[in-house]
Image (cartoon, rainbow, N blue to C red):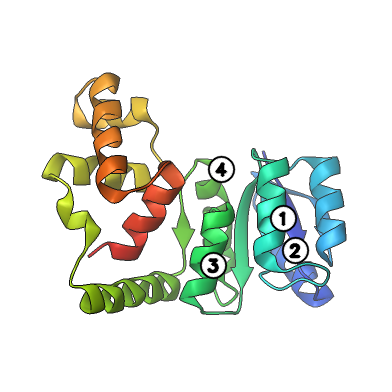
Amino acid sequence: MISVVLADDHPVVRAGTRAMLSQNEDIQIVGEAKDAAETLQWVSEANPDVLVLDAVLPGMRAKALVRTLHNQYPGVRILMLSAYKDADLVMGLLREGASGYLLKEESMDAIAQAIRDVVQGKKVFSADILELLQQAALGEIAQTGKNPLQQLTEREREVLDLVVAGLNNAAIARRLFISERTVKYHIGNIYGKLGVKNRTEAVLLALKYRE
């Protein structure tokens, strides 16, 4: 059973989301919040597997709220559910610890599956958001003439793709028929070439510049 807290300042949205998600036998809504303060309180009390969070809540800016939640409750996956299509906002929220960004126009089946995916460590996005990120990356590449992913070897690209998919080192090793030590070696090289410090930064860069 996946425990979920819903945070949205519109009661009708919360009620509708709760009713639809509750139809999934593996998802349990354990709390609802209408603002940042209630969100922090519910996450503290319920310690849910997933927080489904609106990008605009009264009381605190989204990036600051996600940063606070991620620092205080690193085990809680944060899935953004928003009406805003903004690449800079999405990238900022991901850097602060969000696990994905869905648009409110998504079906409830898609939202339910996204909840399952983020619990498994995957990053999830609406198709329009992925397109925005790709367009932003192409614009930056056009200005600088450089795509940092081009520095990677074919094997490093394979490893990075599996990191983006949410696989841990052991799972990557099994998938590619190599040792965990070799996976760690490749990941170290990837970090060095991309100038990143951890998995989250590597995933963000991969999503931004992926062809």
Q: Toward which corner of the image does residue 13 lie, by quadrant? A: bottom right
Residue carrying label 3: 102
Q: Toward which corner of the image does residue 187 lie, by quadrant? A: top left
The residue type indicated by label 4 comes to Val
Q: Residues within 10 Å of mark 2 (few under 14, many from 20)?
A: few
Residue carrying label 1: 22
Q: CA distance from mark 4 to mark 3?
A: 15 Å
Please indicate, yes or no, whether residue 98 appears anywhere in the rendered image. Answer: no
Spot occupied by residue 11 in the image (x, y as percentages of width and height): 83, 73
Of tags 3 and 1, which is closer to the observer?
3
Near-viewer residue (47 or 69): 69
Q: From the viewer's perspective, is 24 left or right of 209? A: right
Near-viewer residue (18 or 65): 65
The residue type indicated by label 2 comes to Ala
Please indicate, yes or no, whether residue 48 appears anywhere in the rendered image. Answer: yes
Label 4: which secondary element = helix
Lower position in the chain sequence, tag 4 or tag 1:
1
Label 1: which secondary element = loop
Residue carrying label 2: 19
Spot occupied by residue 205 in the image (x, y as percentages of width and height): 35, 57
